[in-house]
Image (cartoon, grey):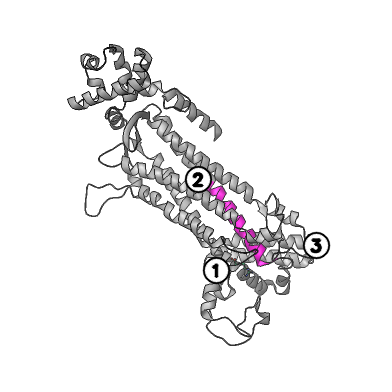
């Protein structure tokens, strides 16, 4: 970093030709992105290698120079990987840091690398490659997470637990069914990353500054070399949109919401009041003052990650919303947010995968809770419709009276005597007790997608086949 304002030798080596003096120290600080965009070094070097090879194949630079560039870039790569690359803030960003070092290493041919290219298409290419890798990482992370949830679902396909609405006991469901609800959510998250990846997989390289170039470049060749499906069809669009990053962040935000909801349930379920689950030691922490405590910190942190991930999403939307075409420096602010969101999403996915795999569901506790709170009241109403021929609205009313009676007696529905039931509605017979148990209740919910263990097992099998 320099705070000097002396002419000539402080001017930027890459673009300083028309400048008499170097930048103010604060200008250097606000302008530089090397502090974070150094994370794009692999992508930057890969893009430059593809570009140089194409320039040589097209006869735009000679093959000796291209070979020197190739070798020099490999040296730069190994220097960065070994941790002895001299990063410089004065050189602003990863692109100019790499090129300046290349010049030190190979001299004049380095100056030919930037032919028919601009940092605008260069950074768009690098960033797309990076985000594409993150889509792959998220897809892989979600596959593992779905595996953990499937493991839980399979073990407890017929374990009964209370299903809630308004966090009030509603109807009995199975543990497997509850886990499979998250499998569906994470499956959609996975497909969102797949969709986004497919859409972003076009190459901006060769769009140059904004208008394309007069050199006879071959954009198909560089697109192929970088595993893109095709070159982007409009050079202005190629250098100026960041919708691929917004799609990644949007998919990440939705996924983080799902993670957060599951995390919240784990926090509730692991509390002393619920005890539906216990977390393994590997995923809990103790309290420095209360020896009895076992805190679900990992779940709480996963629950919180949505804050920064959605924050990144909002930040990038806000940066992009008013920008005229094509490139504006505002867009340098696209990267840190995405880096942070991606890092934290991958961490949250991995933590949830491990936590869920090591989680013990307490079958007895869940089943006891499922029986409380009149959870089979709907089954009773359905029985009155089916066996006593009542219209559903009347059956609902009769059941309400029975619930009130049980509440008054301080018992659950199956504990009412037949005589007590008949005092409310004489059509009720002994047979009603067959539907008041929670196991009968879940087994009867055979509609497609319902909680009956057969249905749950069918969904587990479908997912296992799909993975
Ligand atoms: N560091 C810049 C960024 O991240 C690279 C592109 C610079 N382009 C320019 N015309 N100044 O956006």
Secondary structure character of the magenta stretch overall = helix
> Residue at the location (39% across, 52% down)?
304
| Left or right: 457 in relation to 465 | left
Which quadrant does ligand 1 occupy?
bottom right
- Label number found at residue 141: 2
Distance, label 1 to label 2, CA atoms, is: 29 Å
Mark 1 or 2, closer to the camera: 1
Magenta segment includes 422: no
Q: Quadrant of residue 265?
A: top left
Compared with residue 198, is residue 100 higher up or lower down, i.e. above or below? below
Q: Quadrant of residue 239?
A: bottom right
Q: Which element type, helix, strand or loop, lies under badge 1?
A: loop
Q: Residue 202: where, in percent of width, then height?
A: 67, 52
Mark 3 or 2, closer to the camera: 3
Q: Residue 246: where, in percent of width, then height?
A: 55, 54
Q: Residues within 10 Å of mark 2 (few under 14, many from 20)?
A: many
Question: Which of marks 1 and 3 precedes in the sequence?
Answer: 1
Which residue occupies the foreground of this view, 255 or 380? 380
> Residue at the location (59% across, 55% down)?
243
Whether the residue under disc 1 has CB within 8 Å of ligand 1: yes
- Label number found at residue 419: none
> Residue at the location (29% across, 16% down)?
433
**Extreme residue in the left direction:** 409
Per the rendered image, the range of residues in magenta is 117-138
Residue bearing mark 1: 33
Question: Which of marks 2 and 3 precedes in the sequence?
Answer: 2
Residue bearing mark 3: 216
Q: Residue 438: where, in percent of width, then height?
A: 32, 24
Which residue occupies the foreground of this view, 438 or 53? 438
């Amino acid at each position: 970093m320099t705070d000097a304002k002396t002419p000539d030798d402080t001017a930027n080596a890459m673009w300083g030709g028309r400048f008499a003096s170097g930048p103010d120290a604060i200008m250097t600080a606000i302008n530089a992105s090397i502090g974070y965009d150094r994370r794009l070094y692999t992508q930057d070097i890969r893009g430059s290698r593809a570009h140089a090879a194409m320039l040589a194949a097209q006869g735009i630079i000679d093959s000796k120079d291209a070979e020197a560039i190739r070798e020099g870039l490999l040296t730069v790569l190994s220097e960065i990987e070994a941790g002895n690359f001299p990063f410089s803030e004065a050189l602003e960003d990863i692109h100019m840091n790499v090129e300046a070092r290349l010049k030190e290493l190979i001299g004049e041919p380095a100056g030919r690398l930037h032919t028919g290219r601009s940092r605008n298409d260069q950074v768009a290419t690098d960033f797309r490659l990076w985000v594409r890798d993150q889509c792959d990482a998220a897809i892989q992370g979600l596959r593992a997470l779905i595996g953990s949830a499937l493991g839980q679902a399979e073990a407890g396909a017929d374990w009964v637990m209370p299903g809630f609405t308004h966090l009030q006991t509603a109807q009995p469901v199975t543990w497997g069914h509850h886990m499979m609800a998250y499998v569906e959510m994470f499956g959609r998250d996975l497909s969102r990353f797949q969709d986004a990846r497919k859409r972003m997989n076009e190459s901006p390289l060769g769009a140059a500054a904004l208008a394309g170039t007069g050199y006879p470049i071959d954009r198909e060749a560089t697109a192929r070399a970088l595993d893109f499906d095709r070159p982007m069809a409009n050079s202005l669009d190629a250098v100026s949109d960041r919708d691929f990053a917004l799609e990644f962040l949007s998919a990440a935000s939705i996924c983080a919401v799902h993670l957060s909801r599951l995390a919240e349930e784990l926090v509730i379920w692991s509390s002393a009041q619920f005890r539906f689950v216990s977390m393994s030691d590997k995923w809990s922490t103790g309290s420095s003052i209360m020896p009895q405590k076992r805190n679900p910190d990992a779940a709480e942190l996963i629950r919180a990650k949505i804050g920064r991930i959605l924050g990144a999403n909002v930040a990038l939307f806000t940066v992009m919303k008013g920008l005229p075409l094509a490139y504006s420096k505002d867009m340098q602010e696209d990267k840190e947010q995405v880096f942070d969101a991606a890092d934290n999403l991958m961490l949250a996915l991995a933590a949830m995968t491990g936590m869920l795999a090591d989680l013990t569901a307490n079958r007895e506790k869940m089943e006891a809770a499922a029986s409380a709170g009149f959870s089979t009241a709907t089954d009773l109403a359905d029985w009155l419709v089916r066996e006593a021929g009542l219209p559903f609205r009347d059956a609902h009313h009769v059941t309400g009276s029975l619930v009130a009676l049980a509440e008054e007696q301080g018992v659950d529905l199956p504990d009412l005597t037949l005589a007590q039931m008949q005092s409310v509605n004489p059509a009720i017979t002994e047979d009603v007790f067959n539907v008041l148990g929670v196991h009968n209740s879940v087994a009867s919910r055979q509609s497609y997608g319902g909680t009956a263990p057969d249905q749950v097992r069918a969904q587990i099998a479908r997912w296992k086949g799909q993975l």
